[in-house]
Structures are given as C-alpha cells and as structure tokens.
Amino acid sequence: MTDAARAAAAKDPEAVGPETVEARDEAGMRSRGFVGLVLLGVLVAMWLAGWQSGTAAQQMLSLTVWGVMLGGIIALGGIGLTLCYGVLKFPNFAHGELVTLGAYAAYSIVLAVPNSLPIWRFSFGWDLLVGLLAALCVTALVSIGLDRCLYRPLRRRQSPLVLLAMASLGMAFFLRGLIYIFWGSDFHFYYVGRANPALHLPLGLRLQADQLFVFALALALVAFLYWLLTRTRIGKAMRATADNPDLAQIRGIDTERVIAWTWAIGSAMAAAGGVMYGLASQLRPDMGFTLLLPMFAAVIMGGIGNPWGALVGAIIIGIAIQLTSAFMSPAYGPAVAFALMVLTLLMRPQGIFVQR
C-alpha cells in the first residue's frame, strides 16, 4: 500500500478500494492473533511458575477454572463500564461504588424478606433473586438521579472531560460515605452458616454451583447487551450517540433519553456484578473499589465499547489473578491486572477486539 493510500484509509475507510480495507482487516487480525498468543504465553508462564513453586498441577487447574468464574464477576461490572464510557466518553470512577451499592441493596432485601430454601445445589434461594432484581432497579434509579444532579449540568456547560472524571471521583467518595453511614463498616454475608457444597467434576475439579451461576449470568447479560445494541431502537440510538452525539441530535435522537438509558443499563450491570461478588466472597464497603482497576483493565484490554471484548478481557484478568495467587500474595491481584493492561496497550493500544 502506498503512503497516499494509507493516508486516505486513515481519513475515510470508505474512500479507498476494497483491497485496501481487506488488507487493513487482515493486518488487524494478525495483530489480534499476536496479542492473543503473547497473553496466552503469559498465562502459561504463570501456570508453570505456580507449579514450580510447589502447587500441585490439579490445584493449578482448579485455580484456572476459578479464574474464569472470577472473570465473570469482573465482566459484569466491566460491561457497564464500557457501555457508559462508549456513550458518555469519560471514565466513571464512581462505577465501583455502584457495584457496592447494588450488593448492599440486595443484602437489605435478603434481610427484609423471609429466607427461602436453597435452589438446587446453590447456596441461595428465591430471596436473593428478588434482592438481585431490586438491586438492579435501585442502582439504575440512583445513577439516573446522579446524572440529573451532577453530570447533566456539567454537560450543558460543555465542561471538559477531565472535570467530569474528577466529578465522578468525588461522587465515588460520596457514595462510599453513604454506604458507611447506612450499613456500617463491618463485613456482611448474604447467608451465615449456610452450606455451599462443591460439585465434583472430571479431572478432580471441585466447583461450587454458585460459581457456575455467576458465569452463566455474565454470559447471558453480555448476550442480552449485544442484542440490545444491535437489534433494538434504543441500542441503535446508543451507538449513534456514541459515534457522533451532535449528528444524532440533528437526526432527531433524544440524546438525553439515550444517556439516561445508558446510565440505567450500565449501573444495573454493575449491581449484578456486586451481588455476585458478594455471593462469592463477602460484602464490605470497599468491594467495588477493589474491583475498579480489574474492571478498567478488562475493558481497555478487550477494547472500549465492545461487550464481548470486555468479557474476554475479564476472563484473562481473572485467570491471571487466580494463578499468581499460587506463588505470590493475593493482595497483588490488582497490580497483575494493571500489568496485563499495560502489556496489551504496548502491543495494541486500541484493545484486542476494538470495533471499527
């Protein structure tokens, strides 16, 4: 390809011939394949490092599977993050607190309604599912209210993106303070003393049924969001607003309504991630902040604006965090996520599955 053709392709992909577009797509596929091989090599090196440190191969295999399940939790929060960033064009640092708010909202419902018997081999009953649905609604309403009170006035004043980012950081501290006021600083569990039996799978794997539910929920919500963005009118309006909000408004799209839907859907995804994280471990006021860096890493690694990319990035991050716990302190998990994100950006700055 000549220099003139490259310049034309950079300015307008449709203005060049099909050969140019095909060559660019082929180069993109090779780049994605190279990044994928490098990340796979990093995970294999982590696996071998854990094995060499004295961890049995069967345990390393279990950690790998548990990492996939952890990736499902990260993906639930990351999907909402990538949706909000794609439409609103600023990093919402309060997204982690929306994760925490959803978890505690479900906890309040579980305490308020009578406890039901566990479903199948899960540790939870119908009361937690009711709490999950309530958490989705509460968190969506809270996020829409925050947009009306804080972010919309800033948008109307055409404030710079850095100011919106700083406002979201301040809102994160505000929401965390409210969580401390209403629920205290103690750790909580959805169910105290309830058995959580493990399923015995082939190759000696032991996996809790709750972990399977978390991953299945993540897959279902990613598929739902993909369908929403590609098959519905509000989804197409979201994509148009993300591409060019001024042009979308000229074409008759109510961008403020689209933004409200974006906040509602993104925060509902965050709430689902919070409930699942609380079910898998425990509830604490800083749980969302702990997940914030892995969520950002997964979104940036997979490609901002791509739900499936966020899921793949989250799975890679989750596996890496679990594998490194075999030969270093689990407290370094966020640092591992950050290192993988930086490695991906050095090789492919736009992310693995970026959309054209």
Image (tube, rainbow, N blue to C red):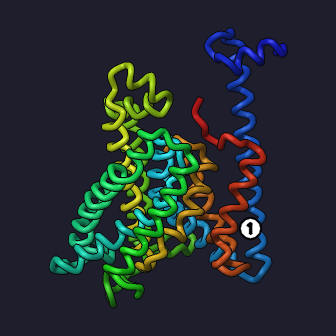
Residue hosting label 1: 46
- Residue 145 position, x and y percent, is 30, 54
SS for callout 1: helix
Q: Mark 1: which amino acid?
A: Met
Count of numbered marks: 1
Quarter of image, res 197: bottom left
| Relative horizontal placement of residue 132, taking residue 305 as reference (left or right) | left
- Residue 171 position, x and y percent, is 44, 62
- Residue 323 position, x and y percent, is 66, 70
- Residue projecting furthest to the front: 157
- Residue 356 position, x and y percent, is 59, 29
- Residue projecting furthest to the bottom: 193
Q: Foreground residue, 13 or 125? A: 13
Quarter of the figure with the N terminus = top right
| Relative horizontal placement of residue 7, taking residue 103 as reference (left or right) | right
Q: Foreground residue, 199 or 99? A: 99
| Relative horizontal placement of residue 275, taking residue 90 as reference (left or right) | left
Q: Residue at coordinates 38% horizontally, 25% vertically from top-left?
A: 249
- Residue projecting furthest to the left: 114
* Res. 232 in view: no
Q: Residue at coordinates 53% horizontally, 61% vertically from top-left?
A: 71
Query: Mark 1 packing: few (<14 Cα in 10 Å), some, or many (20+)?
Result: many
Quarter of image, res 229: top left
Q: Residue at coordinates 24% horizontally, 76% vertically from top-left?
A: 110
* Res. 315 in view: yes
| Relative horizontal placement of residue 230, taking residue 170 as reference (left or right) | left
Q: Residue at coordinates 46% horizontally, 65% vertically from top-left?
A: 172
